[in-house]
Amino acid sequence: NAGVTQTPKFQVLKTGQSMTLQCAQDMNHNSMYWYRQDPGMGLRLIYYSASEGTTDKGEVPNGYNVSRLNKREFSLRLESAAPSQTSVYFCASSPRTGAPSNSPLHFGNGTRLTVT
Amino acid sequence: GNSVTQMEGPVTLSEEAFLTINCTYTATGYPSLFWYVQYPGEGLQLLLKATKADDKGSNKGFEATYRKETTSFHLEKGSVQVSDSAVYFCALSVIGTYKYIFGTGTRLKVLA
């Protein structure tokens, strides 16, 4: 079982460059999420997709865009990278189909991004 | 609003010591509560969860009880091992939304 797969694992960008972080899950989950993890700040929600065809902003969406390509895939794009976007990015998914829910999140292993 | 507050780390313990990591929350209604563990270089893994007041979640010797009156969900383990060294995150699912909110994480280091 692959679970949630993120690519790449590491990336270094120069300020102003763009890139797309890829995420795919093979658990037939409905909801998918992008978080960033920074020291002392825990995980902060960037964007999420409650179901295929929908996306919504989280706490820190500025500077990012997302695409829910299909039920399996949810990508995160940085159009013009800034040093403040240096972070570890995690994709997660959940089987939940409504709110409230006791379904937990399933995480990928993260992408470590450095913007110089 | 909704928030999760965890005790600051790092927490350093000797092997076989008793562990408590405090977590309190602010939320509308009664959200589901979770503890996740993150080992170096990996993503977060679900450790345990509780979905209603007075529920006790448990897994791998870890326990946490959903306390509505104190809005707390403290993580405990009776005897820690070196292999428990990791970062622990408390989280809640926000009622009426698809969002999950995390605490800042508590790093645990267990010495042999």
Image (cartoon, helix red, strand yellow):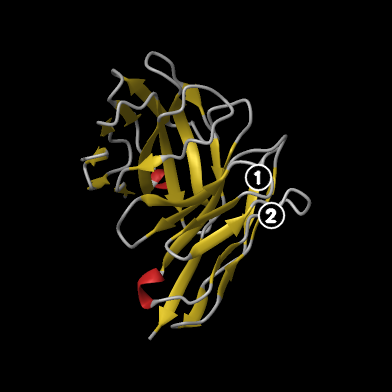
Q: Residue at x 26, y 39 (%)?
A: A3
Label 2 Cα neighbours within 10 Å, binned few <14 / some 14-19 / many ≥20: many
Element type where label 2 sits in the image: loop
State the residue lying farthest toward the top: A53
Element type where label 1 sits in the image: strand
Q: Which residue type carries mark 1?
A: Ser
Q: Residue at x 37, y 41 (%)?
A: A106
Which quarter shows the N terminus of chain A?
top left
State the residue lying farthest toward the right: B69
Q: Are marks 2 and 1 in contact (CB under 8 Å)?
A: no
The chain under label 1 reads: B
Q: Residue at x 29, y 31 (%)?
A: A27
> Which x, y percent locates residue A85?
40, 43
Q: Looking at the image, which is closer to me, A66 or A98?
A: A98
Q: Quadrant of residue A20?
A: top left
* Residue underneath mark 2: B72
The chain under label 2 reads: B
Q: Looking at the image, which is closer to me, B107 or A65?
A: B107
* For marks 2 and 1 on the same chain, the one whose residue lies earlier in the sequence: 1
Look at the picture and state if A98 lies above or below B51.
Answer: above
> Which x, y percent locates residue B103?
57, 52
Foreground disc of the pair 2, 1: 2
* Residue underneath mark 1: B3
Q: Residue at x 53, y 74 (%)?
A: B78
Q: In whole angstroms, how far apart are the C-alphas of marks 2 and 1?
A: 12 Å
> Which x, y percent locates residue A43?
48, 47
